[in-house]
Image (tube, grey):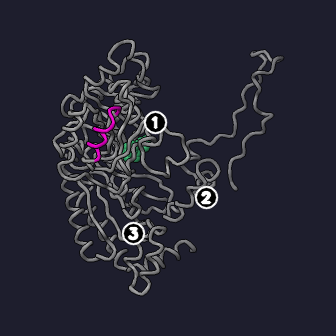
Amino acid sequence: MNVIEKPESAERLDLNTPDLAPTELAPQIKPDLLSVEDAASMSLGTMTDLFMAHINPGQMHFMKLLGFNKVKVERAEGMYYYDQNGRKILDFFGGFGSLALGHNHPRITAARKRFQDESRHEIAIAFMSQYAAALAKNLATVSPGDLDMVFLGSSGSEAMEAAVKLAERAAGPDRPKIVHAVNSFHGKTKGVLSITDGELYRGQFKLVDNTVRVPFGDIAAIERAFRADKQIGAIVLETVQGGGGIVEAPDGFWTELRALCDRYGVIMVCDEVQCGFGRTGKFYAFEHHGIVPDITALAKSLGGGKTAMAAMIAKRDIYMKAYGAPKNALIHAQATFGGIGESCITAIEALNVLYDEGLIENSAQTGAYLIERLKELQNRYPKLIKDVRGRGLMVGLEFHDFSQAMPLVVKPMIAMLDDKLKGSLPGFIGSALLRDHGVLVAFTEYNRNVIRLQPPLIATRAHVDEFMDALDAVLSKGVVRIVKDFVASQVG
Ligand SMILES: Cc1ncc(COP(=O)(O)O)c(C=O)c1O
């Protein structure tokens, strides 16, 4: 395998060698490091070798199935990636919602360049940061009610860890239990993994045991849990379930939940890491329901598609209860890179661009057009498409189980395998979209029959048309040809 050899251990200095005084240390020999230029010009073959040797060999299996192993992205702009062959790839994946502004938005790159040219400072631990202060103020401004207190971090998991810890402290030591939902996803760090529902992620780990699991959107089940268990202090839900398959709670759920939380004194946390930042046609998805949670969290697109930035935003009284006094103030103060300068200015600019360019309205309008066009397609291919759902540009396209799409004679035989085959039809269709039409889509973790569509919020009707033409061309081949072409692509 063409991988970089590590230097022999003899070349590494043992700093504990007793007879070597510091002044007698031999100079550090620079190891054979790759440069930034080496990285940029790396061949697809070397990338693959290094991924296998140092990142995640098992994941390569899935990359090959979807054809991702054949793409080296050379650059990305707006709605498109450009690969090593100059091919444009339309991005309807959008980094699971991280690319609201598209790739390399010129205002974002210009703001970052200015920040660098002016030699601004980054780490916000000793001195206060004007950038963190401005970002926190902006987040308080766009957040309804008294969601005023902001914790800055660098991943959705970190923001959700902050949310759960704040809720637990504010609820007090007698109410440490947290309600979460079936098919929830809140991150993979150990604390929030305990309220992330997937066996795939949770299976092997010892998790915190103060959790209570309820069906998503089931207000009666939640009330029963609140009534039965006085130790419940918080409930954590995604406002729209992403990994669950783009799923919304029934009408009226959120207002009833707000009332229930108030009645039982339970802290309500809405995870907006994926559905926030304008994705559903309002800044926060909970704004569609006229409620304000006690704590929320953002990440993904808050980084302007260019950096890692996340925030927990909480009501001031809850924050003050948990961390308001000097003796509590440092219990969960920001980590080393929380509020780092260039990430903050990127997020400040991202928020300004979101409003200046009317991207929240565009998400609502272009999303409605996408859903309308997908529903037309569902009418034309009812044996393939089971459901179209979503809000704004957070859209789920659910396919039937494999057997439903098969000719009558083989249907009963295939039906026995439907559970095992879940995800294969969207996988074949997704790989055909990339292979034959240069279109990238995503999938959902728990309902594997769903293709997840979360294009940048800069998408226009023309981009939707381009996507729909590609999807129509794939579906029009029929399921047998789709499978045959997939098999050929794997052996070819
Ligand atoms: C709803 C939700 N919460 C939390 C997270 C975790 O975010 P991150 O991957 O940035 O840690 C995700 C990530 O997909 C998410 O979708």
Taking the spot 44% from the left edge, 84% from the top edge, the residue there is: 410
Please tell me how crowded label 1 is: few (under 14), some (14-19), or many (20+) other residues with Cα within 10 Å: some
Q: Nearer the viewer, residue 224 or 474?
A: 224
The answer to which of marks 1 and 3 sits earlier in the sequence is: 1
The residue at which mark 1 appears reads as 191
Residue at the spot 30% in from the left edge and 23% down from the top edge: 319
Residue at mark 2: 45
Q: How many marks?
A: 3
Disc 1 secondary structure class? helix
x and y, in percent, of residue 103 in the image:
36, 49
Q: Which mark is residue 57?
A: none
Residue with the mark numbered 3: 437
Q: Nearer the viewer, mark 1 or mark 3?
A: 1
Q: Residue 226: which quarter of the image?
A: top left
Q: What's the distance in space between the residues labelled 2 and 1, CA to CA? A: 38 Å
Residue 317: image x %, image y %? 25, 22
Q: State which region is magenta.
A: 221-231
Q: Is residue 185 above or below residue 339?
A: below
Distance between mark 1 and mark 3 Cα atoms: 41 Å
Residue type pointed to by label 3: His
Residue sitting farthest toward the right: 19
What is the chief secondary structure element of the magenta stretch?
helix
